[in-house]
Image: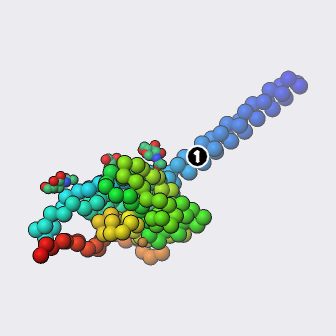
Amino acid sequence: MKKMMMGSLLSQSQMVLTRVLLLLLSFTSMVRAKDHFYDFMLKETNFTKLCITNSVLTVNGSFPGPTIHVRKGNTAFVNVHNQGDYGVTIHWHGVKQPRNPWSDGPEYITQCSIAPGTNFTYKVIFSTEEGTLWWHAHSDWTQSTVHGAIVILPAEGTTYPFPQPDEEQVIVLGSWFVLISP
Ligand SMILES: *[C@@H]1O[C@H](CO)[C@@H](O)[C@H](O)[C@H]1NC(C)=O
Ligand SMILES: *[C@@H]1O[C@H](CO)[C@@H](O)[C@H](O)[C@H]1NC(C)=O
Ligand SMILES: *[C@@H]1O[C@H](CO)[C@@H](O)[C@H](O)[C@H]1NC(C)=O
Ligand SMILES: [Cu+2]
């Protein structure tokens, strides 16, 4: 009788342990689902516009740069590899990032520039933001070609603060600077 009770006690605690493990596992996968990873390759790229070819700094050769897609409350890790010729930082415009200034990006204010040939990973924490923001380089004129959109969808399980749109399109407005020789 005593033995049997011991036995059932043991299997009960084993069951509890299994449940705790399962809970932990699902929690870990939940946390993982909230993280997004991006690699940004900063490099000079030739573009021909208005009949003039300019070599401009881009992220992954695209102008405007790649769009970041997250949900409210998510975190994005953006590994910026500087393959260009000058030091650059990237700023996450409008992302408040409370107590996380190390990933804000203004050059020589919260960090030194990312030197050519090196890389730096930004941990961009989305807290209360929802909607469309943008990211841009934060060193001299680099932001004119190094910029892109950040689309922040409503948090998982919540809805838009307006009827769900049928479709979404990102439009980025920018300027194209040309040097016209006299
Ligand atoms: C940029 O290019 C690298 C390869 O050069 C790729 O691994 C990475 O996913 C690209 N990033 C984006 C945001 O498209
Ligand atoms: C851009 O074009 C110039 C002139 O043709 C060329 O010398 C240079 O290597 C090109 N740069 C890149 C990154 O392709
Ligand atoms: C630089 O990139 C490598 C490879 O992607 C990564 O393992 C490393 O953590 C990055 N370093 C920094 C400082 O972000
Ligand atoms: Cu800005």
Looking at the image, which residue is at 23% across and 71% down?
Answer: 176
Left or right of 107: which side holds 63? Answer: left
Residue flagged by tag 1: what amino acid is it?
Answer: Thr
In this rendering, the count of numbered labels is 1
In this view, 101 is above or below 115: below
* In the foreground, 105 or 128: 105
Looking at the image, which residue is at 71% across and 37% down?
Answer: 17
* Spot occupied by residue 172 in the image (x, y as percentages of width and height): 30, 71
Looking at the image, which residue is at 31% across and 61% down?
Answer: 65
* Spot occupied by residue 164 in the image (x, y as percentages of width and height): 41, 71
For mark 1, give the secondary structure.
Answer: helix
Name the colour scheme: rainbow
In this view, 140 is above or below 17: below
Left or right of 7: which side holds 56? Answer: left
Query: Mark 1 near ligand 3 (CB under 8 Å)?
Result: no
* Spot occupied by residue 37 in the image (x, y as percentages of width and height): 44, 51
Q: Which quadrant of the render holds ligand 4? A: bottom left
Looking at the image, which residue is at 19% across and 71% down?
Answer: 178
- Which residue is the extreme one toward the right? 2
- Is residue 170 in view from this perspective? no
- Is residue 177 in view from this perspective? yes
Left or right of 8: which side holds 72? Answer: left
Residue where numbered disc 1 is placed:
28
* In the foreground, 173 or 8: 173
* In the foreground, 15 or 29: 29
